[in-house]
Image (cartoon, grey):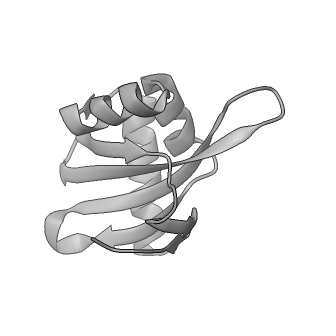
Amino acid sequence: MDAEQELLERIKRLIGSNKYRVRIHAVRHMIEEGFSEENMVEAVTGKSKILEAYTDESRCLILGRFSVSEKTKSPLHIVCDYSKEELVDIITAYIPQKPWWVTPTRRGRTL
């Protein structure tokens, strides 16, 4: 298993064990975009992958999906800070949208 996969497994384990904090920026997006804390947990702990690793900051951008209905899933981006050994901070989370994201995995316009 490579280092990125090991990191993702560690984040999944911590979040799945309720060893995480949701920061205010993520809460703001939850309210504005209509997803919940449970949706974030589902997205990270389910079939997810690290899209971008910011190793100098001990952060990464994870792409996961959460259920909107029985047959529909929505992509969700979650930025996690893993600098603490036994705790993950969910810095922000958002549904990737144009023009910033062309697809859930491909960036569009930058600021």
**Residue 92 occupies quadrant:** top left
**Whether residue 32 is situated above or below residue 8 in the rendered picture:** above
Q: Residue at x 46, y 64 (%)?
A: 50
Q: Residue at x 40, y 35 (%)?
A: 15
Counting from the top left corner in percent of width and height, residue 69 is at: 75, 26
Q: Is residue 79 left or right of residue 40?
A: left
Q: Nearer the viewer, residue 71 or 15?
A: 71
Q: Is residue 35 left or right of residue 110?
A: right
Counting from the top left corner in percent of width and height, residue 60 is at: 33, 61
Q: Is residue 9 left or right of residue 88?
A: right
Q: Is residue 64 left or right of residue 74?
A: left
**Whether residue 36 is situated above or below residue 46 in the rendered picture:** above
Counting from the top left corner in percent of width and height, residue 86 is at: 23, 40
Residue 1 visible? The answer is no
Total marks drawn? 0
Counting from the top left corner in percent of width and height, residue 13 is at: 44, 40
Could you tell me which quadrant the C terminus lies in? bottom left
Residue 111 visible? The answer is yes
Question: Residue at the right extreme?
Answer: 71
